[in-house]
Image (cartoon, grey):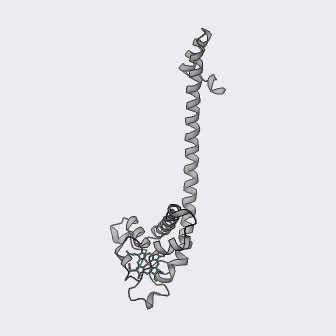
């Protein structure tokens, strides 16, 4: 066990103790150093997980842009500025999604946008808007395959990817 070879004062003390016959002290020291090693490994694992997480966030922006093209571009336009094919036949014009930050004092209103897109908890849920309630649509598409809790997480992950994408196209 290499950890014992380190020149920590504790190890030194323990070796001295063991040469005087107090072996329990050395054992304790090994355990201490093992714990430290484990903490270090955990920290390394944590950093690696963090790296993996940011890689998957980068991927999510791709998912968001694909989902946007599939579900939103028809009204909001492929560039997000509101000129989709359906725009002319809607009584309420689809808003320009690239100015949400500019219209909110330079801060992208992430949570508001999330809730508007989800639509299940906003007033729109009572239903007059031309903007679909995506929370319901995604929930239906995903179904209960991941269990009720897991499915809800997948719905939110999809909305998060969309909102990340919208944030990325702010002017
Ligand atoms: C059928 C047309 C249509 C589709 C498809 C559509 N929207 Fe909308 N959207 C609208 C309209 C109309 C409004 C404005 C009226 C309203 O908010 O109810 C709107 C409003 C919004 C707003 C609020 C903007 C603001 O100024 O506050 C966001 C954000 C938004 N849509 C995102 C999306 C996203 C993301 C998708 C795809 C998942 C999507 N929309 C798909 C028609 C659409």
What x and y, as percent, mark residue 100? 39, 72
* Residue beneath the point at 44% across and 90% down: 88
The front one of 169 and 55 is 55
Q: Position of residue 28 (x, y in %)?
A: 56, 21
Q: Is residue 104 visible?
A: yes
> Residue 147 or 19: which is nearer the viewer?
147
Name the quarter where the C terminus is drawn: bottom left
Please determine whether, in this image, residue 118 is positioned above or below residue 42: below
Q: Residue at x 50, y 71 (%)?
A: 139
Quadrant of the rendered image containing residue 132: bottom left
Judged left or right of residue 130, residue 148 is: right
**Looking at the picture, does residue 22 appear above or below residue 149?**
above
In the image: residue 148, left or right of residue 125:
right
Give the x, y percent position of residue 63: 56, 68
* Residue 95, quarter of picture: bottom left
The vertical placement of 60 against 133, above or below, is: above
Residue 108 spot, x, y in % from top left: 39, 66
Indicate the quadrant containing the N terminus: top left, top right, bottom left or bottom right.
top right
Does 88 sit left or right of 65 as displayed? left
Q: Quadrant of residue 93?
A: bottom left
Whether residue 171 appears in this view of the structure is no
> Residue lying farthest right?
1
Image quarter for ligand 1: bottom left
Q: Quick one: which residue is furthest to the bottom in this view?
A: 89
């Amino acid at each position: 066990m290499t950890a014992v070879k380190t020149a920590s004062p504790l190890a030194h003390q323990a070796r001295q103790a063991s040469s005087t016959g107090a072996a329990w002290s050395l054992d304790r020291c090994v355990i201490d150093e093992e714990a430290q090693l484990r903490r270090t490994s955990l920290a390394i694992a944590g950093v690696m997980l963090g790296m993996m997480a940011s890689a998957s966030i980068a991927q999510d922006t791709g998912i968001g842009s694909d989902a946007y093209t599939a579900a939103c571009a028809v009204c909001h336009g492929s560039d997000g500025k509101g000129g989709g094919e359906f725009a002319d036949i809607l009584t309420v014009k689809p808003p320009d999604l690239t100015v949400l930050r500019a219209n909110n004092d330079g801060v992208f209103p992430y949570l508001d946008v999330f809730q508007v897109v989800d639509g299940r908890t906003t007033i729109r849920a009572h239903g007059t808007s031309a903007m679909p309630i995506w929370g319901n649509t995604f929930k239906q598409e995903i179904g209960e395959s991941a269990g009720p809790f897991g499915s809800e997480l997948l719905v939110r992950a999809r909305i998060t990817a969309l909102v990340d994408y919208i944030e990325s196209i702010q002017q």
